[in-house]
Amino acid sequence: MGKKNILSLLILAGVILALPLGLGNSYYLNVLVFVGIYSLITIGLSLLMGYTGQISLGHAAFFGLGAYTSGVLSTKFGVSPWLALLAAIFVTGGIAFLIGAPALKLKGHYLAMATLAFGYIVFIVFNQASSLTSGPSGFGQIPRFRLGNFLLRSDVHYYYLVWTLVIVVLLVSLNIIHSRVGRALRSIHEGELTANIMGVNTAKYKIQVFVLSAVYASLAGSLYAHFITFLNPTPFGFHFSIVLVAMVAVGGMASVWGAMIGAALLTLLPEYLRAFQDYDILIYGSILLVIMMFLPQGLFAGILGLIKKER
Amino acid sequence: MDSILQIEKLKKKFGGVVAVDGVDFEVNPHQIKAIIGPNGAGKTTIFNLISRIYPPTSGTIRFKQHKINELKPYVIAKKGISRTFQNVQVFENMSVLENVMVGRHCRTRSEIFAAIMNLKRTRDEEKRIHDYSLEMLSFVGLETKKNETASNLTFQQQKLLEFARALATEPDLLLLDEPAAGLSVPEADEMAQFVYRIREIGITILLVEHDMGLVMEVSDEVIVLDSGQVIAEGTPREVQNDKAVIAVYLGERETENANHTKS
């Protein structure tokens, strides 16, 4: 990992520490918790899509699997939230492995369709397995996290918990990117067959990165469940999978920083656009359209490119 | 002396087309052997069968006495066979140095958990990958371009980059698919020099080439292929004087040549 990334991480950590002081315990802090949760997913998606070139239209399902495993275990079986979070990671990672092993043999649109179908199946299970999930109406009273005897109850507490984990996940991801494995992932994106002939076990790395991105999504799901304390299937449907891909595309796929920027923009934008009332969707769509037209590499790479040109 | 590569009764059908039709030949260690033949003779298909881009319909490929035609391409690379491509296949959006570093993958070990923990041995290995790759870049004379994006290189430079990437895998056998194709005459001469230098470091070379000048200059032995079959094999001089070969290259197919026995 280069000096630039370490510096960026330090700046991010500083901003994260300072932000609540400026915002107080306001509504925006709550929104920032969501930005953090979604960033966890988009960082994984950026590894999968931006670096390795494998598309997924089913990541809302992994987010949901994390949330539901965590929620069900802690609420209906009395497992502690931390243990439930860990269990969710193993369950989701295991399912990702079982799905990924056959699905990742497919390429391009076919992989997109397979992951889309998987997402849909999971969504149906959330709705139908009512004995566990309470069906479409959902269930509440999911316990919150505790640190020793200290109960995390306010938005500030969750803000610090979520963003600490974002930093950890960023660090892990940047270490992977700047390693032999990260190089292998990019070579798969550039030319899978050539990479294989040059000695890269492409199937293995594709599954690894798919499982890793699912684990990130699961972690995000658990945080979501123990933050909102209520779960129903709606947030984990096909629509959210698309929103996640849009976040990664708008921010810039080929960079974990871009993925975070995308998550932030697409979470904050609708909040700001509320002022326009009925026209908010129209403006939201137009902004995304303009970004993708003029900065097809996404905001991060696009703006970085503009700055370099100015110099 | 045991041969390094043995091809036996190799056959490949694509639908109804027989691209390679019962080919037998051997490559001896430290040899430069060339496969020539008109377009569609099955030269590149043989390369693609050796590096297992597709499986043979029948026949066997042995490398260092072990059958390799069931193995995955990345395992074949690890066994010691590398190659270049007719229409260059560099990783375009990666830097020149990173391209070569990918070639080093099969000789190094750090996996995902070691990468996440950023262990000392991982960092040390990364340094070794970097240094070795830089050495290979110097070998082909591209060390000054190391930070350039690969797609910005000229065609000849991309071909040299493929050499460096292939060499980084430490192959015992290197398959060169038309190293001179698309190059000017002086550039092709330079390529010939590289082929010699690669042999000097102890690597066996099997090459497919259209450029007769290059083939006759560098090869110890030549195999001539036509319609998926070997029609002649021998030293460049022997092959050049072979009647069947002359017929194929001049496009004449008189009855006496059609009946010509294999030399």
Image (cartoon, helix red, strand yellow):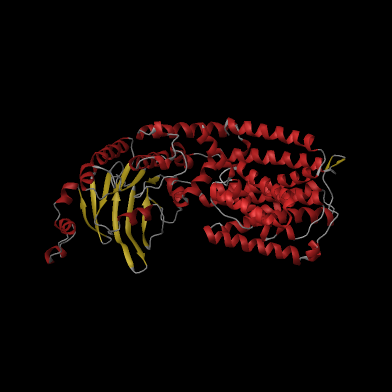
Find residue B38 and report its image quarter: bottom left
Pick the front one: B145 or A11: A11
B205 relative to A218 in the view: left or right:
left
A57 relative to B208 in the view: left or right:
right
Which quadrant would the N terminus of chain A be assigned to in this image? top right
Residue lying furthest bottom in this view?
B16
Q: Which residue appears at 42% of the width and 43% of the height? A: B151
Number of on-image labels: 0
Pick the front one: A28 or B179: A28
B174 relative to A163 in the view: left or right:
left
Is residue A179 visible in this depiction of the protein? no
Query: Residue B40: percent from the left, percent from the top?
Result: 28, 59
Pick the front one: A233 or A243: A243
Is residue B3 visible in this depiction of the protein? yes
Query: Residue B79: percent from the left, percent from the top?
Result: 43, 46
Q: Which residue appears at 56% of the width and 50% of the height? A: A292
Query: Residue A281: percent from the left, percent from the top?
Result: 68, 56
Query: Residue B201: percent from the left, percent from the top?
Result: 33, 35
Find residue B9 and report its image quarter: bottom left
Q: Which residue appears at 16% of the width and 47% of the height? A: B237
In this rendering, the answer to whether A114 lies above or below B219 is below
Q: Which residue appears at 84% of the width and 50% of the height? A: A143
